[in-house]
Amino acid sequence: MNKSLEMKGIVKAFPGVVALDHVDFELRAGEVHGLVGENGAGKSTLIKIITGVYRKDDGEMRLGDQLVDIQSPIHAQQLGISVIHQELSLCPYLSVAENMFMGHAPRRNPRFLIDWPELNRRTEEILKKLRLDGLLNPRTPVSRLSVAQAQMVEIGKAISSDARIILMDEPTSALTAQEVSTFFEIVADLKNHGISIVFISHKLAEIFDICDRVTVLRDGCLVDTLPTANTDMQQITTMMIGRSVDEFFAEDKRKEHEFGAVALEVQGLNRGTVLKDLDLSVREGEILGIFGLMGAGRTEFLRAVFGADKKDSGVIFVNGRQVSIESTRDALRFGLGLVPEERKKEGIFPEMTVKDNMTIANLRNISRLFGYIDKGVVKQDVEGFIKSLDIKTPSPDVKIKSLSGGNQQKVILAKWLSTKPKILLLDEPTRGIDVGAKAEIHRLIRELAQQGLAVVMVSSELPEIMEMSDRVVVMRDGQFLGQFSAAEVTENGIIQLLSHHEGVNEEAVPV
Amino acid sequence: MTQISTEKVKQRGSAHHHFSLITERYGIIFVLIPLIVLFGVLNPAFLSLANILNVLRQISIFGIMAVGMTMVIMCAQIDLSVGATVALSGVVAAMVASAGAPLPVYLLAGCLIGLIVGLINGVLTVAFTVPSLLITLGSMTAIRGVGFLITGGRPVWGMGDSYKWLGGGFILDIPVPIIIMLLVYVIGWFVMSHTTFGRYIYATGGNLEAAKLSGINTKMVTMWALGIMGLLAGLSGVIWSSRLASGQPIVGQGYELQVIAASVLGGTSLAGGQGEILATLAGALIIGILHNGLNLLGVSPYWQMVVTGCVIVIAVILDSLRRRGK
């Protein structure tokens, strides 16, 4: 068996935490190897060591049979290691071809001139391999591409530099089911050419679809490496979170409770072609799930209700009273809160402390004369939330960027909870979060609903929506297509509703 | 076995963490202290009380403005018009004073002019979502023009001796400008560390979109940061004109760069969201100490310029390396 990469006893520590504790990892030629683990398990640290972003503190690495010490990302690339990050690293104003061959574009004589015809020709070759020939023009600026197409360009980039090892970090998080299956076909092609792939994902179903073997990390340690044929999702999940899956899902049985009065009502919400005449109502204690795929307008809907975007028309009632929400300050005043879709871009202040992130929305209420903030009061509130939401942080005074995604999300939740909202809008609240933290956040949301909060939750994960919602609304192209109660909702029902309005039966598999 | 080693790492980490928090914010101390020691050793006169007061008084004008500039830069903006505002407020105060008005009135007049200029910059910046860099690029010339217009291009005289008190007087043997500067820093530090407005500035510069989604009126925050900048420039302008004992429409040229340098030396990030008022004071001190120390050593003013420029570049590089090393 040809080993393309072998890592033994890898150790990596940072101040205050051991990220990798004597981890072994082995990659065979032509295999697709899944890497799973909760956030904080060490996956991303391992990837960074392989790609040369970090230097290992201890342990041995071999490429083929050679002992290596990867010094830098450029060194890693020279050794044939390429990585496709979760957040795409393309230059939006440059073309597909320029991005694909970034740094190694073919040259003419004299050597400082780029050979454009050759560049475009080679790009076409790669596009063919990616089954995109005819669909993408090498000269198109990347900014005009869809997320899925841009991802393909990233893969093309890896191919163009003759990578033998490609690491893919959550590559399918922004793809539709159709795009995912095309993606898997391309991965299979790469496999056949002897390229080894490390596939990092939180979507265990995909791990089992595409990977030959899977490695589970937990708390910086290797739990096990198994062929996917010899295991199942339950076992993997147990290995990841260290306790039986049943424990988690047993807790999720929702207690039946009465819903209160209508907390939020939206009538005739319009915004250009993005939101078309939308009506919605949510009661106290109810969790309303909005399901739809990318581009449906779900985020835009939440933002319009929250006053973050201007609407063309629409009336909003809070607790039966008509209110005017033209800004986020208005929304706050009337008891709304919004947990945005993209944590890093819209949710957290990375350089500010956990404490500041948690209190920033509520300062108006807790500050005294001239805006003076009583640090003692703040400390109490903050410590209260850290405890009640079980937020893992060394102290409230560390920068929030050092926390894992799940814990950052909890801080954002705490931020809104401290404003004592009546209505909570959640946009993909568990995106990019591991199984353990996900279950915790679900539990928190349910508790909040039980305490009388009205919750609107947007998600593109069908299982999550079905499990959490008291009612499910299906959205497409800026319109609500219909709704299901918890009792009557089925995967098929939702998919039928979506495809019926599409005209083409696009999705047979839930995302 | 692994448990033990993990615990040790975590303990070390906690102490390490607190120390690194402080050095991160006030790292400029590591440039300031050696500099003081160096000059003190090379010329003991440097450390005399008279000289210390000298340095402090010399940095007071742009030191005061650096507080405002730090706030503005932390909002991910910048203000190039402060030098022009210094001139304008100086001549306005002088004109009001020469008409017979007492200290509180002409001081207020100068500060008010500065505040108005700052708010105009602020309103234009936020109403049209244009970077204040570009707005103040234009306003700096217009403001100076106004100064020349109202004075006919000539200095303003005839304010009487009491006018000199603000810039040249003493309170308990300490020059008045120093007292004002220290007051401004105390208030500035308090606002940035202990008030909601301060938190809002950190948030606006740290992540504009997240700030908006957290219910912060980022436009107001930015506008007022620029307003405060103008107010402080106005205050400095009155002090400066008092020191010159005349209202001069031509003063202040190039001040904005000194002020920005002081702020940046103090670790304020031009990207916004990071900065500390007290560190800005250290930045201003470094510039003042260099000027003063090199003077005492008899170094030519031209060499002083080269040295000061190099020190700023080196300090900024060191700061960047230190941040990157985290």
Image (spheres, grey):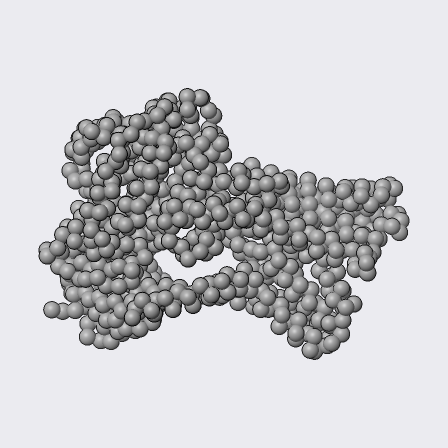
Residue A274 appears in the rendering: no
Residue at 34 percent of width and 49 percent of height? A406
A226 or B163: nearer the eye? A226
Q: Which residue is at 66% across, 74% downward?
A: B37
Instruction: Say which quadrant the N terminus of chain B sits in.
Output: bottom left
Residue B130 relative to residue A507: left or right: right
The residue shown at (22%, 39%) is A463
Asked where in the image residue B169 lies, by quadrant, the reply is bottom right
Could you tell me residue B241's position as x and y percent?
79, 51
Q: From the image, which quarter does the C terminus of chain B lie in?
A: bottom left
Residue at figure coordinates x 14%, y 52% from the top left: A232
Residue at the bottom extreme, as displayed = B42
- Give x and y (percent) for residue B301: 72, 69
- Residue A115: x and y in percent read 31, 60
Question: Looking at the picture, does residue A120 appear above or below residue A75?
Answer: above
Q: Is residue A354 above or below residue A20?
A: above
Nearer-the-camera pick, A436 or A23: A436
Give coordinates of residue B261: x percent, y percent: 61, 59
Residue B274 visible from this viewpoint: yes
Say above or below: A372 vs B264.
Answer: above
**Left or right: residue A35 compared with residue B258:** left
